[in-house]
């Protein structure tokens, strides 16, 4: 099962459209995660129409229209792994312990907010993944997104993709 992870698209404020490499990945993914800060409903509509399965949450920059359509936290069981998605997890310091306590029984947590890619595993085995942002790199050298696979009940092939400058 192929996964696409993205977050913090901030359309149309940070970019006019999603980058073509990200759009191409949507078409090959079995499941697309979006960890919030869509900003516009058109992006949600686009991903809903193009994704085989979309798992999304709202972020702090998402208004009432998006909040009405998306939860704060989403849960899914995929290929024997328990996933959760949330926008914000708080400061980097103490993140592993905080998330392990907040999401017991979850194998993989997809989150966003910081625009900073993140891939760590807590002492309890919870895998934390932040794909960064495909449209707003902030202090990062590149805009990014992630792909991964679920194979035999394991998360494999986690890859951070750097997007070319616009």
Image (cartoon, rainbow, N blue to C red):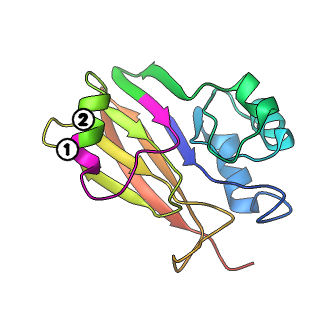
Could you say which is closer to the camera, residue 95 or residue 129?
95
Q: Is residue 81 visible?
A: yes
Could you tell whether 15 is left or right of 98 in the image?
A: right
Percent from the top left, x then y, of residue 125? 18, 37
Q: Nearer the viewer, mark 1 or mark 2?
A: 2
- Magenta-drawn segment: 84-97
**Alpha-carbon neighbours of circle 1 within 10 Å: few (<14), some, or many (≥20)?**
some
Could you tell whether 7 is left or right of 156 in the image?
A: right
Percent from the top left, x then y, of residue 139? 53, 77
Query: Hey, which quadrant is residue 16 in on the image?
Result: bottom right
**Alpha-carbon neighbours of circle 2 within 10 Å: few (<14), some, or many (≥20)?**
many
The C terminus sits in image quarter: bottom right
Disc 2 designates what residue?
100
Q: Residue furthest left?
A: 123
Disc 1 designates what residue?
122
Could you tell whether 158 is left or right of 4 in the image?
A: left
Which secondary structure, mark 2?
helix
Could you tell whether 152 is left or right of 40 in the image?
A: left
Q: Is residue 89 magenta?
A: yes
Q: Earlier in the sequence, mark 1 or mark 2?
A: 2
Percent from the top left, x then y, of residue 44? 77, 37
Q: Is residue 1 visible?
A: no
**Measured Cα–Cα span from mark 1 to mark 2:** 7 Å
- Mark linked to residue 58: none
Is 146 situated above or below 99? below
Query: Hey, which quadrant is residue 67 in on the image?
Result: top right
Which secondary structure, mark 1?
loop
Callouts 1 and 2 close, C-beta under 8 Å: yes
Q: Residue at x 26, y 21 (%)?
A: 105
């Amino acid at each position: 099962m192929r996964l696409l992870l993205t977050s913090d698209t901030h359309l149309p404020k940070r970019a006019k459209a999603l980058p073509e490499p990200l759009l191409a990945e949507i078409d090959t993914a079995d499941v697309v995660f979006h960890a919030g800060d869509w900003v516009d409903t058109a992006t949600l509509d686009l991903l809903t129409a193009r994704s085989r399965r979309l798992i999304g949450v709202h972020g702090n920059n998402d208004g009432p229209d998006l909040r009405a359509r998306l939860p704060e936290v989403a849960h899914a069981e995929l290929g024997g792994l328990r996933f959760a998605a949330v926008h914000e997890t708080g400061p980097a310091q103490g993140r592993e312990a905080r998330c392990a306590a907040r999401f017991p029984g979850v194998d993989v947590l997809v989150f966003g907010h910081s625009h900073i890619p993140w891939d760590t595993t807590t002492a309890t085995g919870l895998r934390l993944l932040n794909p960064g942002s495909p449209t707003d790199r902030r202090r990062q050298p590149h805009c990014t997104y992630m792909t991964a696979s679920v194979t035999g009940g394991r998360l494999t092939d986690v890859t951070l993709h750097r997007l070319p400058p616009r």
